[in-house]
Image (cartoon, rainbow, N blue to C red):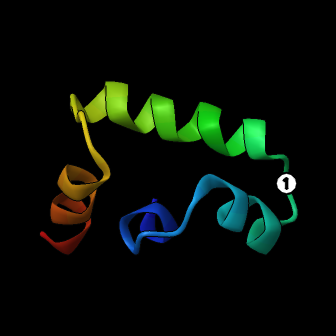
């Protein structure tokens, strides 16, 4: 969540965590659903709070 909030792409996050890009997409989508977010900017605001 923090890496996405920092503006890293799914591909960058996957490389940093040694996981698949699709796995990152799945987790980011789950976070967006759970917190009712529509953008990474909103995610960044949530992480900073």
Residue 22 in percent (x, y) is at: 75, 36
User: Would you place residue 11 above or below residue 24 in this image?
Assistant: below
Marker count (numbered): 1
- Crowd band around label 1 with a 10 angstrom C-alpha radius: few (<14), some (14–19), many (20+): few
Residue 19 in percent (x, y) is at: 85, 54
- The front one of 49 and 13 is 13
Q: Quadrant of residue 37?
A: top left
The residue wearing badge 1 is: 19
Q: Residue at x 58, y 38 (%)?
A: 27
Label 1 secondary element: loop
Q: Quadrant of residue 45?
A: bottom left
Q: Residue at x 74, y 39 (%)?
A: 23
Q: Is residue 43 left or right of residue 25?
A: left
Q: Is residue 3 left or right of residue 25?
A: left
Residue 3 in percent (x, y) is at: 50, 70
Q: Residue at x 19, y 73 (%)?
A: 48
- The front one of 43 and 12 is 12
Q: Residue at x 37, y 65 (%)?
A: 5
Q: Is residue 1 left or right of residue 45?
A: right
Q: For the C terminus, which image quadrant?
A: bottom left
């Amino acid at each position: 969540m923090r890496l996405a909030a920092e503006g890293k792409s799914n591909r960058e996050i996957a490389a940093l965590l040694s996981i698949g890009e699709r796995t990152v997409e799945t987790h980011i989508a789950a976070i967006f659903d759970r917190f009712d977010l529509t953008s990474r900017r909103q995610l960044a605001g949530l992480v900073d709070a």
